[in-house]
Each structure stands twice: as C-alpha cells, then as structure tokens.
Amino acid sequence: GRRLIQELRCLGCHKIGEEGGAVGPDLTGEGAQVQSRWLFSFLQEPKVLRPLEQGRMPTFALRPEDGLALTEYFMALAAEPFPYDRAAGTRVAADAAAGIEKTYKRELGCHACHQRDGAGGAVGPDLTGLGQRLKAHWVARWLENPQAVRPKAVMPNFGLSHDEARRLATYLLGGR
C-alpha cells in the first residue's frame, strides 16, 4: 500500500500523517472512518462525494490486488481490523426514528447542507447510502464534535450528547 501511495503520487493531493498536499481530504484516519468494502469499491471507481468541490479523484484503473493493498494499508494505519464488519444490532425503534428525523430536518437543519435521497443542499457530502460507506462509531464521534475530528471542519458543533450523536448516526446509516 505504501509503495502504491508513492507510485500513484497520492501525496500530491492528499495528506497522510505529516506529509502531503491539501487539495484532497486528509487520509490519515481514513481506515477508521470508512468501511473497507466501500473503500475498495471507491478506489476502483471514484465517485464525487462533495458536489461543490472543484477537484475530483482521478480513476487509476487499479488492479483488484492493488485496490486491496491500498484498502488494507489504510485500515492498518488506523489500527482497524480488516475486513471491517459493521456491528449488528444498530437499529432504532420506529417511533424513535420519527423523532430523530425531526431532529435531522427541523432542529439541526442538516438537509440545508446535505443531500439525502436526492433532496437537500450540496455544501456537505451527500448522505445517501452512508451506511455503505462510513462506520457508525466514526459518524457518532463526528456528530458529537466535528472539530475534534478535523479542527478546520466547516460543519457546526451542535452540542449533541454522546447518546444523541449515536442515535443520529444510527439513523443516518440507515438503521431505522
């Protein structure tokens, strides 16, 4: 994975640790954030995640074994098990889901910046299919305090409790 990072010149755009550029996202904690299956698929065929960003990840036509090596590398950097398997039992009761959706739309106004199922803003990443891409514990940590995860994060800190962040993460990941 490290060899491929150099060959593909990933550090020209991305930062890993203390090295690299600032055009693309910092990949230091990527393995803690995303699910390994999603990462492998994304590396094979990158898609736009943030509609308003100017740049786009190039398609490298990676061989499957190279995509696997990069995926394993990012998981190892974050000390995450490979392959990552989402924890079972992350479901929200139907009556609680309605309240969480109200929080998402009315109280926090997430849809003003984020799209979900084709509706909403385009400032932040599209939240459609989030459960296929991100890990629940990372999303909850992000929702609880985005600036603790990324100091320059644009997303506001809504002051959610740990439990509120966990419930909203479960809702966003599709555990309705």
Image: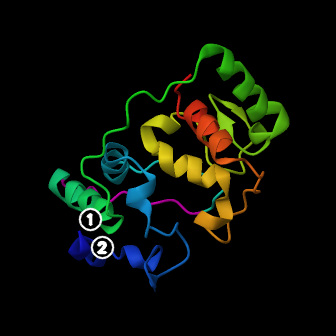
Q: Report the residue at 78% width, 27% height from top.
A: 102
Crowd band around label 2 with a 10 angstrom C-alpha radius: few (<14), some (14–19), many (20+): some
- Determine the image quadrant of residue 11: bottom left
SS at circle 2: helix
Q: Report the span colored magenta.
A: 55-63
Left or right: residue 176 compared with residue 33: right
Image quadrant containing the C terminus: top right
Image quadrant containing the N terminus: bottom left
Q: Report the residue at 43% width, 37% height from top.
A: 132
Q: Report the residue at 70% width, 28% height from top.
A: 100
| Residue bearing mark 1 | 73
Left or right: residue 6 compared with residue 138: left
Q: In the orientation shown, which residue stands out farthest toward the left?
A: 65
x, y (%) of residue 54?
62, 62
Front position in the image: 165 or 128: 165
Q: Are marks 2 and 1 in contact (CB under 8 Å)?
A: yes
Q: Main secondary structure of the magenta part?
A: loop
Up-down relation of residue 148 to residue 88 (above or below): below
x, y (%) of residue 83?
24, 47
Q: In the orientation shown, which residue stands out farthest toward the bottom?
A: 18
SS at circle 1: helix
x, y (%) of residue 155?
72, 56
Please give the label number shown on residue 5.
Answer: 2
Which of marks 1 and 2 precedes in the sequence?
Answer: 2
Mark 1 belongs to which amino acid? Tyr
Up-down relation of residue 168 to residue 144 (above or below): above
Mark 2 belongs to which amino acid? Ile
Front position in the image: 90 or 115: 90
Left or right: residue 132 compared with residue 61: right
Is 57 included in the stretch rendered in magenta? yes
Is 74 included in the stretch rendered in magenta? no
